[in-house]
Amino acid sequence: MSSWMFRGLRKGRVTTAFPWKPPESVPVWTTRPVWKGEGEVSCPADAIKEHRVDIGRCISCGYCSSAYEPNGSVDLSIVNGKERIFARSYHVYLFDAGTCGSCNLEIKSLTNPVYDMNRLGIFFASTPKHADAILVSGIMAEGMREPLKRAVEALPEPRLVFAIGACAISGGILGKAITEVVDADVIVPGCPPNPFTILNALLKSRGDS
Amino acid sequence: MNPGDQITGRMRSGEKQFVLRGYGNPLWSELRSGEEKREDFMICDGRYGEISQGSDVFNLAYGPSTGGLEESVRFNIYTYGERILSIVAEPHYKDRRIVMTGTDPVTALLRIERINGSYSPFYSTLFLTALESLGDAGNDPDLGYARILMNETARMVDHLHVIGRLAEGAAQRVASHQIFALREDLLRIVSARFGHRYFFGVNGYAGLTRKVDFKGISVEIERVASQFREIWLKLEESRIFVDRIQMTATVRKPWLLGPAARGAGYRTDSRISSNGLPYGDLDMQIPIHESGDSLSRALVRKDEIAESASIIRAVEGLIRQVPDAREITEKSFEGEYTTRTEAPGGDAVMWIAVAKSRMEAFYLRPPSIQNLAAFCSGISGNVLTDFTFGFESLGIHVSELGGYL
């Protein structure tokens, strides 16, 4: 046990200073592409119209790089419902409606020592019955329709529903959005959204500035 | 049922061609019984494991959505109360039925990257290798080395994830946190160099879509590998960790692939025989362990992390000028092609057929098919607490178990 402790001390602090300081590392192509002022591109996800990017459809492929550049900001989420009651203790349930696995991994990353969402009073719940919010990722796979409805119904009030990633928000390039089955209070764009974007959305949804 | 319904694709193995159809088709059982004995190929019909019956036996349902599983999958665990008599896995809940037929190659590539985000560079390389072969794009060695570098980095990321999950399941929380922090370090290296943590959009036709600076990347990756070695040495000192994963979920079937096969003493690695990437130019070691249990599989992955770091060091020295990706739309593709590669979970085979630059058919045999079957086979006879060790040690990705239209 002591050897683990010494290793930890030698390694020093690895936890991010976010949200008090800017993120240390942002995968640029998961942030909003902005038109450079010249050039035209054809977006394979149909996310660009008249030089404006529908960030809910953007699949972070970077194929628009000849005319667009990412702005690098992790503040991408759109929060339509806030619950300040979750400010001190916030339990969230991860629901995979039909993902490629990467959204799940980015959400789960929030518990590693680098992001350590527990320090901000955010925790994973093992069942929707004990959760304040449900983080839904992936397209709406047919087999997960009924489990999703039942999971959302099992959440106690007040509750928040998150649509995490392009697939959940718009169906992306693979299928249908989860909003066909449930209404989302918070949308978190990206393919997949990076952990800072997800953490930022969680904080915003409970009213943190 | 119309035999043409729900065709998910076709695969050529040796001289024979197989038509693989959707779930519930009676042809499945016929095909399966004929091919199950083949070492390199197994057909699954969407059900894994066997049902147990008897007095006092009950079905403990786990999933499809629960806090303990990262992806949606249901397990029917047949038990008297402690010992697992058998398990039936049902991965079809999150089957996305990805449409490939009729799509253009650009859309197909983007969808293939998203079959399994963790294996994105492997599957995009498979597809692009096939496409480049059909389009006579040549075989640029620098591009081959760059793809090896991407694949080996993704292999390290996946192995760190699997070992971290295994340590977490075995109550080694300090170790698992430190491993997940290392995985994050590695993802940040990938992010800084490639612009995306999962390599989405990087791999292109006959080149890379972005300018990537490879200089010095092996030094950064070696730092991660070296820290992992240090953590592993401490981890294997833990009797609790070793006792929990040793002799659990032991499986030694001839159809095993990847770390599961190498952990059961089988010397198999399709990087040696791959028709896509120039692994033959490299001096590569294949780690083998004999026991076939969760510990052996973890040991294989641990050794492969070091081996991947060594491969990355070698290829970085060989990369000179990686070509820019060419426009896929400028080419006209026609024909069919089969490629294979060694993904972190094992051998993956892709077969594509293209007509007039449109996907006519697509089939992917991902390693998770074998790994899930291996889990259902190996976990029988173990106790319920061993479930996590068996499942996590096989590195199963449910996302790649879906069908294609």
Image (cartoon, rainbow, N blue to C red):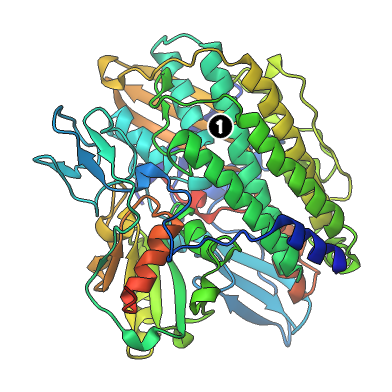
Quarter of the figure with residue B205? top left
As displayed, is residue B98 above or below residue A56?
above
Kindly state the secondary structure of the residue where label 1 is placed. helix
Q: Callout 1 environment at 10 Å: few (<14), some (14 to 19), or many (20+)?
A: many
Q: Would you say residue B29 is visible in this rendering?
A: yes
For residue A82, side relative to residue B227 (left or right)? left
Q: Residue furthest left?
A: A50
Quadrant position of residue B316: top right
Residue B282: % across, % down:
72, 18
**Can you say which quadrant of the picture contains the C terminus of chain B?**
top left
Question: Which of these two is toward me, B235 or B58?
Answer: B235
- Residue type at mark 1 is Met
Name the foreground residue: B31 vs B247: B247
* Residue at x 33%, y 91% (from the top left corner): A157
Q: Which residue is mark 1?
A: B150
The image position of residue B343, as x and y in percent, is 61, 38
On the rendered structure, is B108 left or right of B321? Answer: left
Q: Position of residue A55 (x, y in %)?
A: 24, 51
In x, y percent, where is residue B302?
77, 46
**Front in this rendered view, residue B133 or A120:** A120
Q: Residue at x 55, y 19 (%)?
A: B144
**Looking at the picture, does residue B148 appear above or below residue B65?**
above
Disc 1 is attached to a residue of which chain? B
Q: Residue at x 29, y 62 (%)?
A: A77
